[in-house]
Amino acid sequence: MSGFLSSSIGKKFFMSITGLFLVVFLLVHLTANLALLFGPNAFNIVSHFMGTNPLIQIMQPILAAGFIVHIIYATFLTLQNQKARGNDGYAKVVNSHQSSWASKNMYILGSLVLTFLVLHILNFFWKIKVTGSPLLAEVEVNGEAMENAYALVAALFTDQKLGLVYSLVYIFGAIALAFHLTHGFWSAFQTLGMSNDIWRKRWTVLGYLFAFAVGGGFAIIPLFLMLFA
Amino acid sequence: MDLKLKIWRQKDAKAKGQFELYSLNNITKDSSFLEMMDVLNEQLLSQGIEPVAFDHDCREGICGMCSLFINGRAHGPDTEITTCQLHMRKFKDGETITVEPWRSNGFPIIKDLMVDRTAYDKILQAGGYVSVNTGGVPDANAIPISKEVADEAMDAATCIGCGACVATCKNSSAMLFVSNKVSQLALLPQGKAEASRRAKAMVSKMDELGFGNCTNTGACEVECPKGISISHIARLNREFLMATAKE
Ligand code: HEM
Ligand code: FES
């Protein structure tokens, strides 16, 4: 087993498993977020559910661990790969047309996602779970008292001074994530050995659709709030 | 045609290399790239300069000895050919052509454009074979193999071990090479028996020799002179993961 952990395919195995786990997380997170399009009450109900459901609470530390493993292995693999070229690199490289830009820049895209993630956690998660915010003052929805998560989100994107900046940053984060997924999605299945000439085309198409849905889905929220809130 | 050649010169494995610029005139469009290199070396000899060392043997695209990273691409600006099959008509008159050796920790430079590809032999020795016990020669048609399987195994077997996959991969990964042999033999009944052991042994040798980790960019199959698909890498991953799961 120790041989497996240190082997190239073993390391890639952990990248792909954690990557796919994060893909599932994105689906759940996006579905929850899209409740916002149905108004403040819908969003507050979903936020309340996400904040109190025991399964979601159990998954939180596992999710954090998933991110950490993915990032540690990504760093390790990328450093090893850069070293493998040797001391003298090529003077001239023509990028072959068939390997996508995203596939060659996964670490850069991942780092952008990570930077965004830190900002995102500070904006919402941190305020809800740790510091609190006057915006979160309880509201009553269908007879149940809950935090006004909607107000916190809406305030960020409609802020007089920084609303536009935040919106653009969030849209940019969504685009970086989408690019990461255009390669990451199919790549994970290739790493797991679940591909051949036919399935490769299917995973790639599915990956692009997923990337587009995730990127577009997350970008819609700041756009929606800027335009309609 | 008249050319400028920017060529990597390096005295030996330990020396520090650098690019030298040479002018070469009156090359016909129909000559091959290696013939052009021969003419250059004749010219260098007549000028008392040491000729450029480069690898070649069959000069017909089957031995895998020729290499060269030409104008930023393994085996130059064409697809599914080796450098010896590259023709000067792919270049423009007056062009400056950059010629570099394969670059990878797994392929140390011996001299100029020549690299040491013994690493590939070591990987094959680790498991890229079928053990045959002594005895009579088996009947060639005794083991039925379906056409599709035979074709796929044959596709993998067309690898000539030139190293273009490693040279072109941004990670210097040897996965396409390793997967060819693992896939070819795992597909055939003669090789199946040892498939798990082979996958593990060859991957562990590959990792040990300083190649990088595959990130599925697919650059290797584009530059492979035999156009071998990275689907074979998926099969290698499968064999390797199954072998680990079985333990
Ligand atoms: C929600 C966030 C993320 C998701 C859904 C995600 C998903 C994925 C997936 C599915 C893969 C393919 C794995 C494979 O090829 O086997 C991948 C690869 C990769 N990820 Fe992420 N990732 C995320 C965040 C990050 C972060 C924060 C980083 C870190 C800096 C990162 C760096 C990388 C790198 C470098 C690769 C390529 C590694 C390789 O192919 O070996 N990712 N990601
Ligand atoms: S010299 Fe034999 S393949 Fe080019």
Image (cartoon, coloured by chain):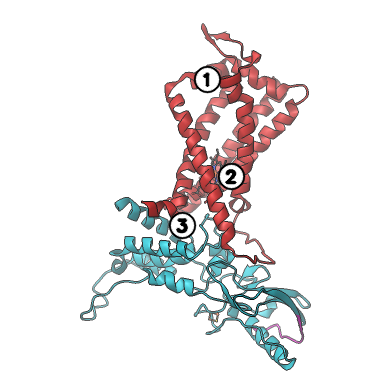
- Mark 3 belongs to chain: A
Query: Which dot, 3 or 1, sits closer to the camera?
Result: 1
Give coordinates of residue B78: x percent, y percent: 62, 71
Q: Which mark is residue B222?
A: none
B14 sits to left or right of B29: left
The colour chain A appears in is red
**Which amino acid type corresponds to the residue marked 2 in the rendered image?**
His
- Residue occupying the point 69% across, 78% down: B89
Q: What is the distance, in whole Å, between disc 3 and disc 1 at their CAs?
A: 41 Å
Q: Which mark is residue A46?
A: 1
Under circle 1, the secondary element is helix
- Nearest the viewer among B172 and A188 is B172
Locate ligand 1 by image quadrant: top right
Mark 2 or mark 1: name the one nearer the start of the chain. 1
Question: Does ligand 1 reach within 8 Å of label 2's beta carbon?
Answer: yes
Give coordinates of residue B57: x percent, y percent: 53, 84
Question: Which quarter of the rendering shows the C terminus of chain A?
Answer: top right
Disc 3 vs disc 2: Cβ atoms closer than 8 Å?
A: no
The residue at which mark 2 appears reads as A180
- Nearest the viewer among A220 and A8 is A8
The residue at which mark 3 appears reads as A197
Q: What is the distance, in whole Å, between disc 2 and disc 1 at their CAs?
A: 27 Å
Residue B31 painted magenta: yes
Give coordinates of residue B154: x percent, y percent: 40, 70
Main SS of the magenta part reads: loop
Mark 3 or mark 1: name the one nearer the start of the chain. 1
- Mark 1 belongs to chain: A
The magenta region covers: B22-32
